[in-house]
Amino acid sequence: MQIPAKADYAIRALLTLAQSEISVSAEHLAAEQHLPPKFLGAILSELRRGGIVTSQRGVDGGFRLARPPANITIADVLRVLSGPMAGVRGMRPETLEYEGAATALRDVWVAVRASLRMVLEHVTIEDVSRSQLPHAVTQFTSDPDAWHTRP
């Protein structure tokens, strides 16, 4: 699975918002996380439409989280920006039907989606901003092999 820059930037901006008591401008968020301002502005607009952030115009304007950071999962953000998790050719894995030697492939795709959910639906913006990751993450990161890319 590839995490697009759009998702990485969105989560980084949300982590900054999670630590702020006031509305924060897109420009400040971009500068704080060294992100391209125009691209971040477009991302924040998507997050606003998806109910993750709210925005306010004016002198004290900017962006805020739409709900507490403990109630926003990484999966919520990814779904707003990219749609359903682990789609196959744009389809939900449970709707696929394979024949012959590929019959069990649907189960593999459903398992991939379930494993992504096991981590991404249990990690909140608050968890990451406080560096207190749940067991769903640390069980994987404690395995030294997880830190090595395979060719």
Image (cartoon, rainbow, N blue to C red):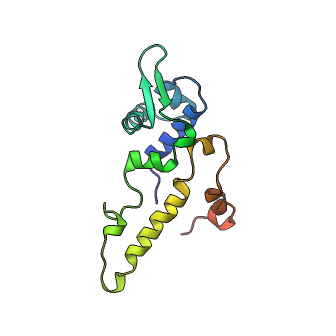
Where is residue 54, by image quadrant? top left
Q: Identify whether 114 is placed above or below 125.
A: below
Tag count:
0
Residue at the farthest top position: 59
Foreground residue among 41 and 73: 73
Could you say where residue 47 lies in the image, as x and y percent from the top left?
A: 41, 37
Residue shown at the point (38%, 33%) measured from the top left: 45
Query: Residue 149's x, y, as percent?
Result: 58, 64
Residue sitting at the far bottom: 100
Image quarter where the C terminus lies is bottom right
Q: Is residue 90 left or right of residue 137?
A: left
Q: Position of residue 87 (x, y in %)?
A: 37, 61
Residue occupying image coordinates x 38% and y 74%: 106
Residue at 41% across, 49% down: 79
Horizontally, residue 139 falls left or right of residue 89, namely: right
Q: Residue at x 42, y 74 (%)?
A: 107
Classify residue 80 by image quadrant. Answer: top left
